[in-house]
Image (cartoon, helix red, strand yellow):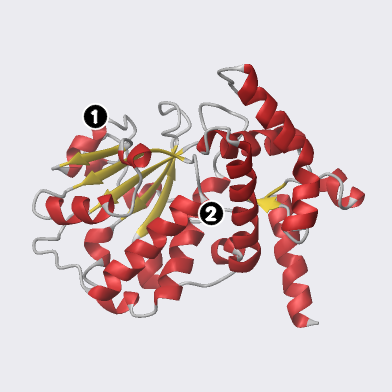
Amino acid sequence: MKFENDNQRKVFDQVFTELPKIIAEKCGGYDELYGYKLNPEDDKDEAEKYYDKEVAQHLIYKMCKAFQFQKPLVVERIVNVLNWRKEFDPLSAAFFEAHSPELEDVGVITQYPEEAPNKRVVTWNLYGQLVKKKHLFKDADKFIRYRIGLMEKGLRLLQFTDEDNNYMTQVHDYKGVSVFRMDGDIKKCTKQVIDIFQKYYPELLWAKYFVNVPVVFSLVYGMVKQFVDEQTMSKFVVLSEGKKLAQYLKFAPKDYGGKQGNLKQQNISTVKPTAYGLYLLEKHNNEDID
């Protein structure tokens, strides 16, 4: 963790020290973030098994950094994120629920341990295939839960205490889209997903590559700009050809100009939750049965 001045350190220390009280009073005791436990004080047995102070510190540091170490705003956003996670249950979306095979086929997760810092975990969204299946957007909730589940699986492969692997890189591929018409259902789902990422997944994106978008560039880019803040936009790279991606990812698949196997061969299909995440999933499942 790096602090530019004493005030940043002071704000971080205050927020982290007050975290158990914030969780108890404003989050109904819910203390899970990306599968990790944030509160060491609510249940000593749980804390001994699942609490990792270093991980918790790095996660709260990210929240402080995302909101410029403005303490009231940082606390507000932490509360919002934890309450949203308690209600939405993204761990279930990632590790428990079954999604449409058609959706599963257009989302890929890859991991490159020797890649450049923070390009080691990459989620791929093959939107060129997805927009041809407009029926999948008729039920916005199903699409959103699938997409959030993919995000959570990618986060599971990050190491939040490692400054070289605590951000995610994303690739959006529009190959095969010659005429792109953003109908109402697709636009609605896209806006909702972007909004969720902006609000509840701050300081996690390292870079986002849009590839194979020469024809639809103005529509795709223009639409995204409506919903994304300036800081996030600075992380976007637009490439006219998929094979140019190898200039940015040295372990890119063959289909993207690299020397490795094709993308589907690199897909990590099985990602397991953290120990605390698994405990919460089993606990919630047992409560539902009771």
Asked if residue 247 is positioned above or below residue 24 in the image, the reply reads above
Q: Residue 253 versus residue 118: which sits nearer the camera?
A: 118
Image location (x, y in percent) of residue 42: 86, 52
Residue found farthest to the right: 44
Residue with the mark numbered 2: 152
Q: Which quadrant holds residue 241? A: top left
Name the quarter where the N terminus is drawn.
Answer: top right
Image location (x, y in percent) of residue 29: 78, 58
Instruction: Pick whichever of labels 2 and 1 is earlier in the sequence.
Output: 2
SS at badge 1: helix
Image location (x, y in percent) of residue 237: 25, 38
Name which residue type carries label 2.
Answer: Glu
Q: Which quadrant holds residue 96? A: bottom right
Q: How many marks?
A: 2
Residue with the mark numbered 1: 247
Q: Give the residue displayed 62% in from the left and 49% down from the top.
A: 76
Q: Residue 53 versus residue 126: which sits nearer the camera?
A: 53
The disc placed on residue 232 is: none
Residue 33 in sight in this render: yes
- How packed mark 2 is, by other alpha carbons closer than 10 Å (few <14, some 14-19, many 20 or more), is many
Q: Give the residue displayed 35% in from the left and 71% down from the top.
A: 102
Q: Which quadrant holds residue 126? A: bottom left
Q: Residue 229 versus residue 287: which sits nearer the camera?
A: 229
248 relative to 22 in the view: left or right: left
Name the quarter where the C terminus is drawn.
Answer: bottom right
Residue 166 in sight in this render: no
119 relative to 270 in the view: left or right: left
Image location (x, y in percent) of residue 78: 63, 48
Q: Give the residue displayed 27% in from the left and 66% down from the top.
A: 130
